[in-house]
Amino acid sequence: MFAAASSHGPPTAVLILFGAIFFGGLVVVTLLRGFLIVQPRTQVVVLRFGSYIETITSEGIHWVFPIGLELRRMTSSVISVDLPKMTVLDANGSPIEVSGICGYRVEQAHLAALEIADVAEYVRLLATAVLKNVCAEYPYEAANPSTPCLRKENDTIARHLVDELQRLTESAGVEILQLRMNDLAYAPEIAQSMLLRQQASSMIVARRTLVEGATETVKSAVTRMDAAGIELRGLAREWLIANMMLVLTSGERVHTMMPIDLATEKE
């Protein structure tokens, strides 16, 4: 009875063959899962059973052992982050509104992938804090052209911003390329007052320039008159200089008559 049943079942060799094919196919499929393509400007962090193995940085096709494999991809392209407008105090205690833009890229992908949950948010928060702190160390504008100020944002301030943010983000494997101020203005509550102050300062500078130019003009005119033999002495000389200065600085003609007769004045 058992012999008859055995004669009608599949041969043992066939079962072994099917088992080998199935096992071989399973192995091939598993090994194929180890192939991965790394795109340009992309880093792949390789983990196996939760442990860091390596970081693949070269583009192209790679193969890693697939058992217990976990891959985390990080871009190496330059990423820009907009910093929102905020109100800070400059070195003189004046409230100003400033916003900025930060450019960075991931240099060490394993640090960015394993140490930081959200790299973009991490950099944005630190860049905002750095921008606020650095702005508090410099005045909005300075009378001395060589003094660093926020309005001009020279190389000194630019380096200070980048160096400070780079120091804070070093543990995240991030390279800071730039941190710049985007919008910069006085806060609305003092904007009108500061505008009046700037207008007054500009007027003073303009008047000073006008007086200096008028003085040089009068000096040159008197020197040429003396060289031409036209000599004026005493009050005549003083009135001539006074009238020339008045005309040059006011831009208007002087209609008042001189109280002396220049032709009959004696020394």
Image: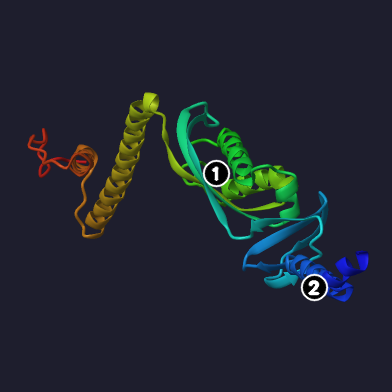
Of residues 102 and 259, the one nearer the viewer is 102
Position in image of residue 65 (x %, y %): 81, 64
Q: Is mark 2 on a helix, strand or loop?
A: helix
To which residue does mark 2 refer?
21
Tell me if label 2 and label 1 are in contact, CB under 8 Å: no
Position in image of residue 119 (x %, y %): 64, 46
To which residue does mark 1 refer?
148
Single out the mark in the foreground, 2 or 1: 2
In the displayed structure, 87 sits above or below 226; it is: above
Q: Is mark 1 on a helix, strand or loop?
A: loop
| Label of residue 41 in the image | none
Q: In this view, does 86 lie to the left or right of 162?
A: left
Of residues 243 and 171, the one nearer the viewer is 171
Quadrant, the C terminus = top left
Position in image of residue 255 (x %, y %): 7, 37
In the displayed structure, 181 sits above or below 135; it is: below
In the displayed structure, 131 sits above or below 22; it is: above
Q: Is residue 43 left or right of residue 209?
A: right
Label 2 vs 1, first from the N-terminus? 2
* Residue at the outermost top position: 189
- Label 1: how many Cα within 10 Å (few below 14, some 14–19, many 20+): some
- Mark 2 is on which residue type? Ile
Residue 74: name its quadrant. bottom right
Q: Can residue 141 be seen in this view?
A: no
- Mark 1 is on which residue type? Pro
- Label 2: how many Cα within 10 Å (few below 14, some 14–19, many 20+): few
Residue 58: name its quadrant. bottom right
